[in-house]
Image: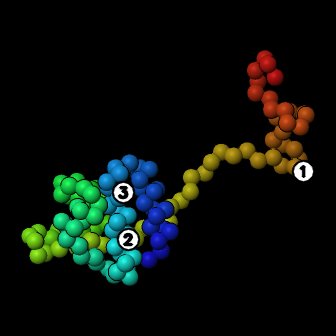
């Protein structure tokens, strides 16, 4: 499991889904648990301990993990009862995120094609005050 890819994927998805602080805390706590268990496929953890460690209510836990599941970041199987723990699985990103292309003007030193003005440091904006 590549931790840096997981983190990059989380923040990329977060830009689209706008996770709450509780959902973010839940995801990172699950990553901590996965790392602590040497990245086993499934992590078992009781709901009452999860709510205590993440400092959230049971309803927030249930809605948060459902949103993370819908976003494709984790999968879980609900425990139910006091003795049956909930099972969590951190999902790996399906593909590497593609970087968006930014419109960055670069200056070609040989042909000087992108020079907007004749003097060095002069930027022509088209206004009357140039």
Q: Residue 4, percent across and down? A: 50, 68
Tell me the distance, in whole angstroms, between the alpha carbons under discs 2 and 3.
12 Å
Colour mapping used in the image: rainbow
Contact? badges 1 and 2 (CB < 8 Å): no
Label 1 belongs to which residue?
A: 110
Label 2 belongs to which residue?
A: 32
The residue mark sitting in front, 1 or 3, is: 3
Using residue 47 as the reference point, say whether residue 75 is left or right of it: right
- Identify the residue shown where x is 79% and y is 19%: 129
Near mark 1 (Cα within 10 A), the count class, few <14, some 14-19 or many ≥20, is few
Query: Looking at the image, which is closer to me, 90 or 58?
Result: 58
Among numbered discs 1 and 2, the one appearing first in the sequence: 2
- Identify the residue shown where x is 28% and y is 64%: 53
Tell me the distance, in whole angstroms, between the alpha carbons under discs 1 and 2.
52 Å
Label 3 belongs to which residue?
A: 24
Specify the quadrant of the image occupied by residue 62: bottom left
């Amino acid at each position: 499991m590549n931790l840096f890819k997981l983190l990059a994927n989380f923040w990329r998805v977060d830009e689209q889904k706008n996770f709450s602080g509780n959902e973010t805390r839940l995801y990172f706590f699950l990553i901590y648990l996965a790392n602590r268990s040497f990245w086993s496929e499934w992590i078992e953890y009781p709901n009452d301990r999860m709510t205590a460690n993440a400092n959230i209510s049971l309803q927030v836990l249930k809605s948060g993990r459902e949103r993370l599941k819908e976003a494709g970041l984790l999968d879980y199987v609900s425990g139910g009862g006091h003795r049956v723990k909930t099972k969590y699985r951190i999902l790996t990103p399906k593909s590497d995120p593609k970087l968006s292309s930014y419109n960055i003007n670069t200056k070609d030193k040989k042909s000087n094609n992108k020079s907007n003005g004749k003097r060095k440091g002069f930027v022509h904006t088209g206004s009357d005050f140039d």
